[in-house]
Amino acid sequence: MSKTEEKSLAANRAAFHDYHISDKYEAGIALLGTEVKSVMAGRIQLKESYVAVRDGEAWLFNAHISPYSHGNRENHEPLRERKLLLHKREIARLADSATKQGMTLVATRVYLKDRKIKLKLVLRAERSCTTNAKLK
């Protein structure tokens, strides 16, 4: 795998359905050892996950990482909050967009880049319905 190649580990295709996507971000994620092994095996679910800014830090909520099958009593909690690794300017911009414009920040993809696990984040807003109701 070359330096610019990315290996997809999981995707959240439902994040694009009926929403308008405005901005995309790449973030690192702070994981425990058993979480890394589970993610590398593709045992992560992003369907109900979302990102929120709290105390100047970005956090990933409701991402389910299955416990590692060969883990011990020190295995991780599947639904724990996970810290995202972003620059302060990016976090401030995300918090501003989420509060002022009413947008939601969602994780859409987990991938391996340069031997590091990364998340693709998108700012999304609900699409307005422009179709007319069918007349009988």
Image: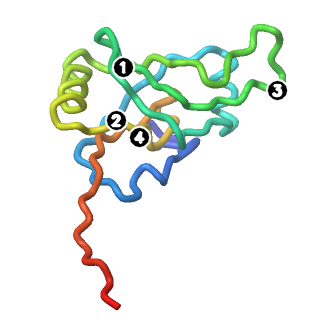
Pick whichever of labels 1 and 4 is earlier in the sequence.
4
Counting from the top left corner in percent of width and height, residue 107 is at 43, 38
Report helix, strand or loop for mark 1: strand
Counting from the top left corner in percent of width and height, residue 19 is at 33, 54
Counting from the top left corner in percent of width and height, residue 103 is at 26, 39
How far apart are labels 1 and 4 at the CA level?
A: 26 Å
Quarter of the view holding residue 86: top left
Kindly indicate whether the residue at mark 4 contacts the one at mark 1 (C-beta within 8 angstroms).
Answer: no
Kindly indicate whether the residue at mark 2 contacts the one at mark 1 (C-beta within 8 angstroms).
Answer: yes
State the mark number for residue 105. Answer: 2
Q: Residues within 10 Å of mark 4 (few under 14, many from 20)?
A: few
- 123 lies left or right of 120: left
Counting from the top left corner in percent of width and height, residue 131 is at 26, 74
State the mark number for residue 69. Answer: 3
Report helix, strand or loop for mark 2: strand
- Residue marked by disc 4: 4
- Residue marked by disc 1: 58
Amino acid found under the numbered disc labelled 4: Thr
Pick whichever of labels 1 and 2 is earlier in the sequence.
1
Mark 4 vs mark 2: in front: 2
How far apart are labels 1 and 2 at the CA level?
A: 10 Å
Q: Residues within 10 Å of mark 1 (few under 14, many from 20)?
A: many
Q: Residue at x 76, y 25 (%)?
A: 68
